[in-house]
Amino acid sequence: GRDYIVGSNAFATITEAMNVATARIYIAAGTYQENFTINKNNISLIGPNNGVDPRNSSRNQEAILKGTISLSNGVDNIKIVGLAFTESAKISARFTVTNFEFAFNNVYNTAVATSTWTVTPLEVNAFMSIYNTNSLASAASKNLYITNNRFHNVPEYNVSIARAENVVIQD
């Protein structure tokens, strides 16, 4: 597929890029206050710090996201790498997600608005909440990789996952 660069020369917003992207969306340094949905397979959101460990490395200027990323039912092969998340940023999936990677991201000073969340045994206040409302084993999310991220000053929970198989949360 074709690569797209948001905040540089292709699109002003991530939503505009998402509407036409079929593979990689590169997000330039800057601040992005928008909510959007990933509703197709094989999408990678790649920030300027892909491959740069936020826990012990100097980072390039950040692409800072402040909105909600929603993952649609059944999306497969989604990567979110090398970005920063702050303020009202969060990631939400209420359905089956397969082959999801969240790596080399810096999550800091988030403020999840508790009035927008319903707390149940499956959903809690969290920066990232991945759960499936369908209790069938065949509907479980699979292959979730959350590695090499920094979570700092995140209220409540950093990550909440329910009804999933093969989950790796590391460092």
Image (cartoon, rainbow, N blue to C red):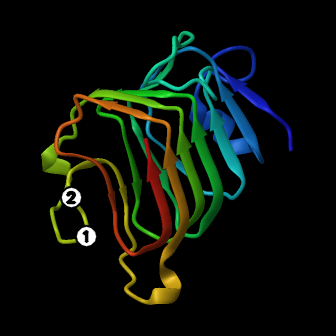
Mark number for residue 122? 1
Residue that appears at 63% across and 18% down: 28
Q: Amino acid at mark 2?
A: Val
Above or below: residue 168 compared with residue 49 = below
Residue that appears at 23% across and 34% down: 154
* In-image side of 25 versus 148 (left or right): right
Indicate the position of residue 48 as horizontal and vertical percent values: 62, 20
Secondary structure beneath label 1: loop
Indicate the position of residue 146 as horizontal and vertical percent values: 48, 48
- Looking at the image, how many numbered discs can be counted on the residues? 2
For residue 60, which quarter of the picture? top right
Q: Which residue is mark 2?
A: 124
Secondary structure beneath label 2: loop
Mark number for residue 38? none
Q: In front here: 115 or 26?
A: 26
Indicate the position of residue 61 as horizontal and vertical percent values: 54, 10
Q: Quadrant of the N terminus?
A: top right
Above or below: residue 163 compared with residue 38 = below
Residue that appears at 63% across and 37% down: 45
Q: Residues within 10 Å of mark 2 (few under 14, many from 20)?
A: some
Indicate the position of residue 39 as horizontal and vertical percent values: 60, 57
Q: Quadrant of the C terminus?
A: top left
CA gap between label 1 and label 2 equals 7 Å
For residue 151, which quarter of the picture? top left
Q: Residues within 10 Å of mark 1 (few under 14, many from 20)?
A: some
* In-image side of 16 versus 113 (left or right): right
Q: Marks 1 and 2: CB-CB under 8 Å?
A: no
Above or below: residue 61 compared with residue 93 = above
Residue that appears at 62% across and 52% down: 78
* In-image side of 9 versus 166 (left or right): right
Q: Amino acid at mark 1?
A: Leu
